[in-house]
Amino acid sequence: MAQSLSESELLALVDRLADGAWHSGEQLAGACGITRAALAKRIERLKDWQLAVEARHGLGYRLAAPIERLDAAQLQAALGERLRVRTVAVTDSTNSQLLAAPAADDPQVLLAEFQTAGRGRRGRDWVTPFAAQLALSVAWSFEAMPPQLTALPLAAGVVCAQRLRALGATGVQVKWPNDLVAEGRKLAGILIEHRGEGGGGCRVVVGLGLNLGLQPRQAAAVTQPWVNLPALLDAPPSRNALAADLLQALAALLSDYPRRGFAPYERDWAELDATRERAVTVQFGDRALEGIARGIDADGALLVDAAGTRHRLHSGEVSLKVRS
């Protein structure tokens, strides 16, 4: 069976289960035009997408929580001509796909329901169960290398945090260099990759992974405390409306960054900084530095006071942890 046909069949089943209600095996099999045995095989295949499907005798099947699929037409209508929008059900990594995409199509965005090889900073895996997050990337081409490019992840963190706080998640903070956190738990991560272009230009890909409906069984491989955005809101927006809101904010940031750099976001970062004046451990490979975080400088470097010395650190292969 062709892979595209298999994916289409699985998506049809996902859409019938998307409401989170119980659906009998007989009804599902009939709607899909298949046998109960074939249905059981498709249900099993959904586990490959890390979908949490419950089965109960006499009731049938249901998802552990309702999901909202991405809608490319709705997103494109909300964003207008500012960004070229594509959505896919499954990909390896939205960042990887856009890095390989033609720069002539920039500015462009790719959103995925499920990533088989989602990437975080320092080469870490990013767990992306089907429809449990916003997993998106924006590709943007600059005519020239923008100022303070190393601070762009911090600016992206600020604008995303501000949008989430505007929705009511007032406890969202930024954690150097590229995380959004709330109540000490990770809410989202940002990964920015860039390439030099001919003629002095520069191309960046901004990736965002935001927890929306992550289930404990799906997050078994996650090694740090995490939180879903709806847990922080009284009335969570729709997944597509949230995606459009964040993409508009990121597009405005990227459009303006060559002219203004990081300066407009420096004060906002200080107000949102989750580690400022806190005891931290900074890991450099096998070495660790323990000190007090003192915020960032104008270029986005982390300032840490340790043993009477102020250290100025860039992200690179550095890992930052708050000590309780």
Image (cartoon, rainbow, N blue to C red):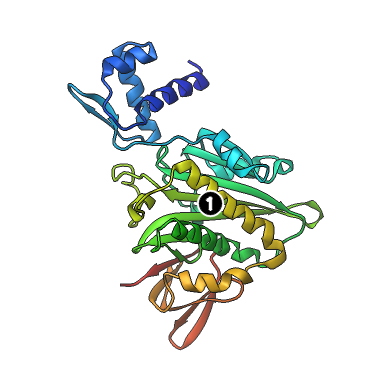
Q: Residue furthest front?
A: 235
Q: Residue at x 42, y 69 (%)?
A: 274
Q: Position of residue 146 (x, y in %)?
A: 71, 62
Q: Is 141 positioned to the left or the right of 316 in the image?
A: right
> Residue 80 placed where, x, y %?
64, 42
Percent x, y of residue 263: 63, 72
Q: Is residue 97 left or right of residue 200?
A: left
Q: Is residue 191 visible?
A: yes
* Residue 189 higher or lower than 148, as above or below: above
Q: Quadrant of the C terminus?
A: bottom left
Residue in the foreground of this view, choosing between 75 and 319: 75
Around disc 1, counting alpha carbons within 10 Å, would you say few (fewer than 14), some (14 to 19), or many (20 or more)? Answer: some
* Residue on which the image places disc 1: 246
Q: Residue at x 50, y 52 (%)?
A: 123
| Farthest-out residue, right | 199
Residue type pointed to by label 1: Leu
> What kind of element bears circle 1?
helix
Q: Please report the residue visible at 34 percent of the width from the left and 27 percent of the height from the top.
A: 17
**Nearer-the-camera pick, 131 or 198:** 131
Frontmost residue, 27 versus 179: 27
Residue positioned most to the bottom? 308
| Residue found at x 31% / y 32% | 20
161 shown above or below 203: below
User: Is residue 223 at all visible to an observer of this figure?
Assistant: no
Which image quarter: residue 104? top right
